[in-house]
Structures are given as C-alpha cells and as structure tokens.
Image: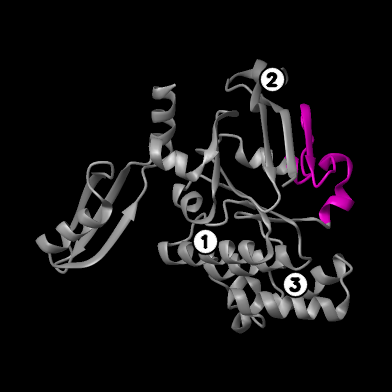
C-alpha cells in the first residue's frame, strides 16, 4: 500500500505573550516562543485507521490543522494525497473531510438538510450522485428524523452524527477527526465510534483521529501515534500498545443500592472477564463500566520505560 499521508520533521512554533504585569508589559509586551509541534515525522498508508493521541496541549489539533491546510508550518514538509496542504488548499479539499469536535460546519439556525444541500453545492456535486450519497449516509448514521431540525436544537451526540455525515458528503479518501467524542456521554461516544469504524471499513477511508480519550483509539483504530509536548513518543500498532502499556483497567460497578465500587485490574494477572464475574458474584450489580487508564498515566509509563 502507498503512503497517503507523509510527514517529515514538521514543526509549528507560536509566539505567545509572557505572563507579566505593569506598564512595561502593556506598552512593551514580552513574548516567548512555544514549540506546539516539534519536528515530528510519520506516514500513513491508504485505508489505515490511525489514532493521534495525547493530553490536552500536546500538539494534536495543530498537526491536524497543518495537514488539512488551515495552518502553515514553521518548518518541515508534509504531503496529503500527494499534495502539499498549505499550497494546494482548493484541490486538497476535494479529497479530505474534517470534523472538529468543538467547531461546527453546519449552519446553526438552518435545518440540517439545508446545510447538507449547501455543502453539496460548495463541493459542486452532481445532483443525482449527491442525493444517492446522502441517502446512504443518512441511513448509516440514522439521522433521517433529524434532517428537518435546526442544528441549534440538536443534542451534542445528534449534532456530531450530522457533522460526520457533512464531512463525508463528497466521499473523501481521507477523514480527519479532531476530538469527535469530546463532551459526549458514554452511550453517545460508543455510537459515534461504532459508526466511524463501520463507515471507514466499508469505504476504505483513511482515518486520522485525534483524541485524549484512549477508548477512541482502542475501539476505532488499528494503529496509534502518541504525541506529548509537541514530540512524537510512540508510533506502533494498537496491539503493541496494549501489550506494553494497557494492562491496567479500571472497573466500576454500581450496586442496586446505588453504591459505586471502583477496582483497578492488571489484565496480565487477571483476565478482565474473570474480574467482572468476581464482582458480579460479590455484589448485586445494576451497572458496570470498564475504563482504560488516563492518557497521562500511559505517557508517564512510556517515559518511565524509555
């Protein structure tokens, strides 16, 4: 398979104002340079589903914005679909779709259907192909009942399903997902993850998904790149990450009396199924959740082993 995304020594620096007070800082403010992305290199093959993971402020969104032509890099090189993003914005837009969890591409007060129609015109899509494509996506993401509703009336989970459909209308080969599950409840997150993976597998869409949620990575992707403080610190398969750093799980059960019991499990020592079965035998359980350790814990473990 050929590389559809290539990144070589990519760097992005920002000048930010130093924290200070007084007249001098007002009239002659001092600035410092921050390396938001610090000489990272990686490649992604066509059809791969890659998680781009890290804590808040790690440089994930900045990288996505450079690859999707929103930002210019300070230095380094990148190619997406054989194009340099910041030099070929218009051409590249036909090959990529973007979803930013905290930014909407749907018109706030318009019905969702109107936003889709406008996007069809913006991408200059053939009317028949557009309707056929939209019908397929509406069915897959189960949003038919939402089409007549204004975007502003949707719940966050409903809006995110519509946002992803909007990003896929022009049938892009690459989909950039920047925190698509941020702010969602557990149920909505699971729905979004399932739909993203199903769509990517059906159409062999290349995914680059940024998140600070390790469950996004584990349930959608087959490879993970971890970035911290602008530097790439891990680039391998999901299985390799599981084997090395995801042995710890947190199980939380809620009893019928409303009591919450949280337990840490090492899956190298106790299979997760056995741990759950033991808890169910000991308590009258009404609900149960299994979580990965926070991203900060995984990053600390990676640094510790290095």
262 sits left or right of 152 in the view: left
Answer yes or no: is residue 213 visible.
Answer: yes
Give the secondary structure at mark 1.
Answer: helix
Task: Identify the residue at image location x=72%, y=75%.
Answer: 110
Give the secondary structure at mark 3.
Answer: helix
> At which x and y percent is residue 84?
84, 39
In this view, the residue in front, 134 or 108, is 134
Task: Identify the residue at image location x=64%, y=69%.
Answer: 162
Give the secondary structure at mark 2.
Answer: loop
Task: Identify the residue at image location x=74%, y=37%.
Answer: 6
Q: Residue furthest front?
A: 1
Residue 224: say if magenta. no
* First along the sequence among labels 2 and 1: 2
Quadrant of the rendered structure where residue 145 is? bottom right
Please tell me whether residue 151 is drawn above or below residue 235 in the rendered image: below
54 sits left or right of 3 in the view: left
> At which x and y percent is residue 246?
38, 41
Task: Identify the residue at image location x=35%, y=51%.
Answer: 291
Task: Please give the range of residues in magenta.
Answer: 66-93
Q: Which mark is residue 193?
A: 1
- On the image, numbered disc 3 is attached to which residue? 115
Are there few (<14), some (14-19), or many (20+) residues within 10 Å of tag 2? Answer: some
Quadrant of the rendered structure where residue 3 is? top right
> At which x and y percent is residue 182?
52, 54
Q: Which of pointers 2 and 3 indicates the residue nearer the eye? A: 3
Q: Which of pointers 1 and 3 indicates the residue nearer the eye? A: 1
- On the image, numbered disc 2 is attached to which residue? 29
C-alpha distance separating marks 2 and 3: 43 Å
In this view, the residue in front, 302 or 177, is 302
C-alpha distance separating marks 2 and 1: 45 Å
> At which x and y percent is residue 52?
58, 42
Please tell me whether residue 229 is drawn above or below residue 25 in the rendered image: below
């Amino acid at each position: 398979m050929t590389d559809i995304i290539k990144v070589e020594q990519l760097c992005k620096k920002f000048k930010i104002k130093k924290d200070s007070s007084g007249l001098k800082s007002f009239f002659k403010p001092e600035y410092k340079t921050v390396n938001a992305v610090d000489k990272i290199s990686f490649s992604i093959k066509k059809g791969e589903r890659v998680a781009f993971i890290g804590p808040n402020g790690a440089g994930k969104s900045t990288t996505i914005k450079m690859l999707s032509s929103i930002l210019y890099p300070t230095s380094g090189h990148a190619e997406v679909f054989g194009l340099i993003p910041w030099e070929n914005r218009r051409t590249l837009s036909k090959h990529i779709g973007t979803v930013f969890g905290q930014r909407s591409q749907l018109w706030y007060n318009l019905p969702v259907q109107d936003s889709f129609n406008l996007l069809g015109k913006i991408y200059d899509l053939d009317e028949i192909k557009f309707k056929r494509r939209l019908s397929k996506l509406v069915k897959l993401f189960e949003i038919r009942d939402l089409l007549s509703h204004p975007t502003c009336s949707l719940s966050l989970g409903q809006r995110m399903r519509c946002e992803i459909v909007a990003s896929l209308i022009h049938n892009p080969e690459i989909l950039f997902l920047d925190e698509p599950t941020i702010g969602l409840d557990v149920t909505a997150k699971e729905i979004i993850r399932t739909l993203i993976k199903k769509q990517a597998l059906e159409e062999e869409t290349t995914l680059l998904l940024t998140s600070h949620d390790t469950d996004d990575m584990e349930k959608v992707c087959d490879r993970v790149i971890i970035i911290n403080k602008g530097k790439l610190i891990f680039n391998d398969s999901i299985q390799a990450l599981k084997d090395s750093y995801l042995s710890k799980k947190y199980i939380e059960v809620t009893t019928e009396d409303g009591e919450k019991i949280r337990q840490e499990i090492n899956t190298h020592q106790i299979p997760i199924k056995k741990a759950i079965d033991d808890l169910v035998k000991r308590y009258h359980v009404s609900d149960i959740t299994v979580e990965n350790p926070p991203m900060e814990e995984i990053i600390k473990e990676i640094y510790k082993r290095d």
